[in-house]
Amino acid sequence: MPTRMALWRLTEDGAAFPVVEERLSAEALIESAVESAPDLLGVDVLIIGQQVQTPSGPLDLLAIDAAGQLVVVENKRDRTPREVLAQTIDYAAFIATMTFDEVLTIYQTYRAHSGVLDADLVEAFEERFGEPLDTLADTPRMIIVASRLDDSTERMIDFLADRFGVPVNAALFQPFAGGLVGRTWLRPEESIRLQSRAANTESREEAKLFWDAWLPVGRQALPGIRLPANGPRSVLIKRRIVPGVPAALTMWVSSSEAYAEVQFDDDDPAMNDALLTALKEKRTEIEAAFGETLDWRAPEAGGLMTKRTKVVTPKVTIGDRAHPTAEGLDRLANTARRLLAAVKPHLSECFDRASVTMVELDGSEESMELPNDELVDLGQGHGT
């Protein structure tokens, strides 16, 4: 039978009377309630996005927990339970492909709707959880929010979680008379939370093992880059290239692959776009020096636009992240070395050209903003 709960009212003489269950006027009320008070879920999360656009449509709520794991919260509404389960998995699959920068941008967009401009997720995370946010867990957690589910959907959720370790659960909000609402979980939330934290801790430890093994190799390949003394518990290492130029050499590692990129990370997205445009004029020369085709990533259109632009290398295999092969360590170090050697000689020139472009853009925008009285004079002069 579907999971349900009962609520009783106790009197002073010890009598118990059942509270009558009611139906919600609209299941969208649950989304609004959870968005305003995430504690209703019974898990410690920070809401970072609402109605986040994905290729399959907008997901209701996106959150992050203290372990750095993204949480997809999807409300059932008027869809069948099977439909909402499939939709939630689809959303999570897309969210899992997002970069750290794109997640930061989602939070900025979300807070901007409340009038908070330039919101910083890293700062909000540290303020909420008391720990720095240096990376995101590999797999998002999924929570389906509903007033009820059918037997078959509950079986599917249990099957996915038990047999394949899929981090999916259902929070069932049951309304009662008097404006009361009860919450129960299809699966015990404490065990899911502990599994999430353990998985994320393991992921961070694996990343540290990789960087500890890679750093001696990286130092030999990149003598001009000041690398950290010890491996960080993070999927990336990011280091400045040329003083005064908003460009960084970043190395990334996943469970079995790694790659390097030069990232333009000025606070102004237009400056980053201008830097990439200037550098692309040297594309033939740069790719010839690197020895392979590079991925030139401009800002993406749409709701997930990231303010940073990048030049990204092909991925290299490293073996297992916790136990990388010597060949894999060499591949990443050699890839980063070749990228740096190909791009660095052009950065200062490109920064100067991009700065000129920005000045010209500012000037053209100012020339278009004529005072109202000047516009009137122009119109009158044309008529004479």
Image (cartoon, grey):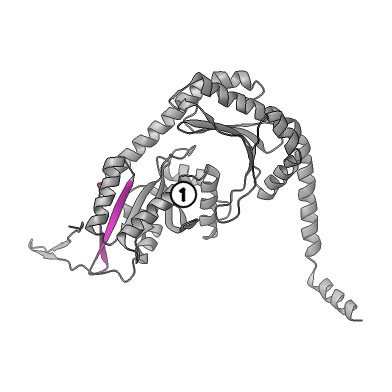
Range shown magenta: 168-188
373 is higher (above) or lower (below) than 40: below
Residue in the image at 53% along x and 20% along y? 327
- Return the x and y of residue 355 as percentages of the image width and height: 77, 45
> If the image is split into quadrants, where does the N terminus sit?
bottom left
Residue 294 falls inside the magenta stretch: no
- Return the x and y of residue 34 as percentages of the image width and height: 37, 58
Quadrant in the rendering for residue 179? bottom left
221 is higher (above) or lower (below) than 3: above
Q: Which residue carries the number 1 mark?
A: 94
- Return the x and y of residue 92 as percentages of the image width and height: 42, 49
Q: Is residue 64 left or right of residue 317?
A: left
Residue 185 falls inside the magenta stretch: yes
Q: In this view, does 153 lie to the left or right of 342?
A: left
Pick the residue in front: 281 or 49: 281
Quadrant in the rendering for residue 321? top left
- State the predominant SS element of the stretch in magenta: strand
Residue in the image at 41% along x and 52% along y? 90
Residue 191 visible to an observer of this rendering = no
Pick the residue in front: 226 or 70: 70
Q: Please tell me whether mark 1 sits on a helix, a strand or a loop.
A: helix
Q: In this view, does 295 lie to the left or right of 351?
A: left
- Other-residue count near label 1 (Cα within 10 Å), few / some / many at <14 / 14–19 / ≥20: few
- Return the x and y of residue 128 as percentages of the image width and height: 43, 45
Residue in the image at 89% along x and 77% along y? 382
